[in-house]
Image (cartoon, rainbow, N blue to C red):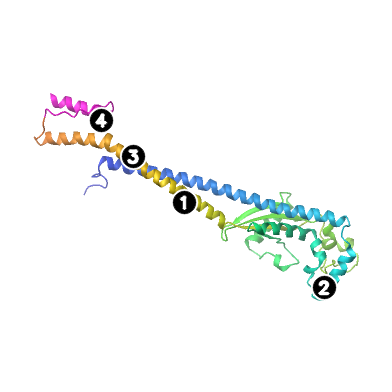
Amino acid sequence: MPKLGLNIGLSAKIIAVTVGILVVVVAVNYSFFISRHTEAMKEAKMEQAARFTALADETKSHMSKVVTSGVFDEDILMEDLQRVLEEDGDYHKAKVFNTIPIVAGWEAAGAAAEREGMIVRVPAFASRNPENEPERGSFEADLLSDLRDQVMAGGVVTIGRIDEQTNTLHYLRAIRLGETCMSCHGDPAKYDEDGDGKDLLGFAMEGWEIGDMHGAYEVVMPLDKMDAQIAGVIKGGMMATVPLVLVGIGIFIFALRLLLTRPVGQVVGMLKDIATGEGDLTRRLNINRGDEIGQLGHWFDTIVTR
């Protein structure tokens, strides 16, 4: 039984090998390009998310300065809070709630992020709002825990990571408590004016200190649009590459037949005629070329004329 490929013509083998190499080169090139392009886009998304969390943090700092400057009339704010609490108990509706620096930060960043199809959250452990408490063992909880450990070790106050299961980018910036935060979260013995151990919203004061981390500003960015853009790049690139490759293969096959297959076929045909006793010994190949095929024709003509 003949071995696979032994009965295939030389030109067919050359074409098969060449096409195989070309396909591999194109595939490797596209894989490398798409990989680098994807990483570049992810880095750009991380930088975009970083800007939104920076906006939230700067807004928090600015609001802290505004609050301490005495711009707001505390008596009016407290009267409004008391009225809201008596009516339905939802302190979120009180005017004073929007003057809280952390709240101002996420409101500003959230409004801007929403226009870009992103979500801004404020996850925190031991959060007063149960909706902000990340589920134990979740991707968000693990990321927040890593950020907390990072901050406690004196590292950077930001962290970003992609959740492969949901195909979303998560970027967190630690929220550091300032002087204005102490009236709600500080040591009751030092900051509680009423002596009941509760802040103005009625929550128990936790006794934290200035500089402590309490949660983070988080930007959640779905990557479906990015994936669609990458798919579009691949599709557009293949639409341009495939025709060029096919044209290149066609030109290669034509050149191969002209430069190799036909002249070698002439030599084989004349040798076959001579071997069967039907060859015309006065006939010449006349392959006037300076390469190996021309040398083959020259020596063939020389041998035949002897």
Name the residue beneath numbered marker 3: 251
SS of the residue under disc 2: helix
Q: Dot 2, crowdedness within 10 Å: few (<14), some or many (≥20)? A: some
In the figure, is residue 67 to the left or right of 266?
A: right
Q: Amino acid at mark 3?
A: Ile
Instruction: Please tell me which residue is depicted at 40% across the width and 43% down the height of the picture.
Output: 244
Residue labelled with disc 1: 235
Q: Is residue 279 left or right of residue 256?
A: left
Looking at the image, can residue 140 be seen? yes
**Cα distance between the residues tagged 1 and 2:** 58 Å
Label 3 SS: helix
Question: What span is colored magenta in the figure?
Answer: 281-306
Residue 293, numbered circle: 4
Q: Secondary structure at mark 1?
A: helix
Q: Quadrant of residue 298?
A: top left
Q: Earlier in the sequence, mark 3 or mark 1?
A: 1
The amino acid sitting under disc 4 is Ile
Q: Looking at the image, which residue is at 44% across and 46% down?
A: 240
Q: Which residue is mark 2?
A: 85
Comparing labels 1 and 2, the label whose residue is closer to the camera: 1
| Vertical position of residue 115 compared to residue 90: above or below | above
State the CA–CA distance, disc 3 to disc 1: 25 Å
